[in-house]
Amino acid sequence: MAKQAILARPGGLMVTAGLSIILFYVALAVLAPILAPYGPTEVSVPKELAGRPQPPSPEHPFGTNELGYDVLSRIVWGSRVVVQVVALSAVLSMAVGVPLGLVSGYYGGPVDRVLSLVMDSVYAFPGILLAIAVASVLGPSVGNAAISLMVVYVPTYFRMVRARVLELKARPLMESLWTAGLPDHWIILKHILPNVAPTILVVFGLASADAILTEAGLSFFGLVVVYPEADWGLDLYYGKNWLLSGAWWLTLFPGLAITSFAAGFALLGEGLARMMGEERWS
């Protein structure tokens, strides 16, 4: 009954589809040692076949690369890197962007002007270029990639939360709360934050979808992990060298994984936006 109620709401089908895709890839990452037929750097073909990619077959449904690594196994193991980077960057972005947005929107004045100026300056940079610049300075690692994405998406959380707080401040209930003499921290935590939470969830979905594509761009340039460690974007980079030779599977399957995982978060964010679009604070 609960599932039917969710599906009946505007955007409910999108939320359900998005969550299903996200949970699939999270399960893939968690269960990689069990689900992957081979290790990410395990040679799975005879020596005489090494040196050239092998096409999809019953033994290797996604084919193999020129080193004899099973592409399906690398997709499964590579999901771990993507999930870790996106999850960690989302937590860091929210931990920084949400409190700053609450403070800036609620107090206004010089604090708001300074924070807005800083965030707008960061937001003006193209996200992928900013992430590449930060990751290049920090060096390739999962943690550094997450920090690079955090720098990109903190302004997004900040701007959306601040805008929502300004909207809530204009409502009559705020006047009664101030008149009652309630402390600011109590108003922010007990009255404003719960009403900002739906906005945070929507931003989380849409920003995470973009973060997956940005992470793929970083890994394409070797700024997340170092080959031969499995990562979708990194496999795309090395797979492109064999496209003209007809080894289409080396780029198709990592590309589909990136696109479908990003689509899951995009569906979640858009669906939540539609479900919560008509909700009002009372």
Image (cartoon, rainbow, N blue to C red):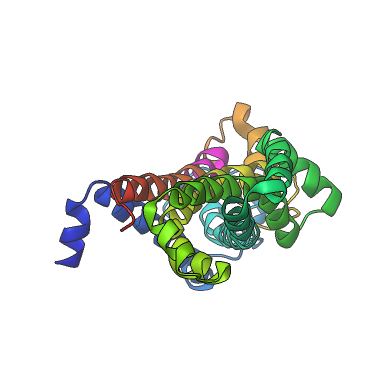
Residue that appears at 32% across and 51% down:
276
Classify residue 191 by image quadrant. bottom left
Q: Position of residue 28 (x, y in %)?
A: 47, 64
Residue 189 part of the magenta segment: no
Q: Is residue 77 shown to the viewer in this render?
A: yes
**Residue in the foreground of this view, choosing between 183 and 241:** 183
Residue for point 20% across, 63% down: 3
- Where is residue 140 shown, x and y percent of the image? 78, 54
- Is residue 125 toward the left or the right of residue 75 in the image? right
| Spot occupied by residue 151 in the image (x, y as percentages of width and height) | 70, 49
The extreme front residue here reads 179
Overall secondary structure of the magenta stretch?
A: helix
Residue 69 appears in the rendering:
no
Magenta-tinted stretch: 250-256
Viewed as shown, does residue 278 lie left or right of 62? left
Image quadrant for the N terminus?
Answer: bottom left
- Identify the image quadrant of the C terminus: bottom left
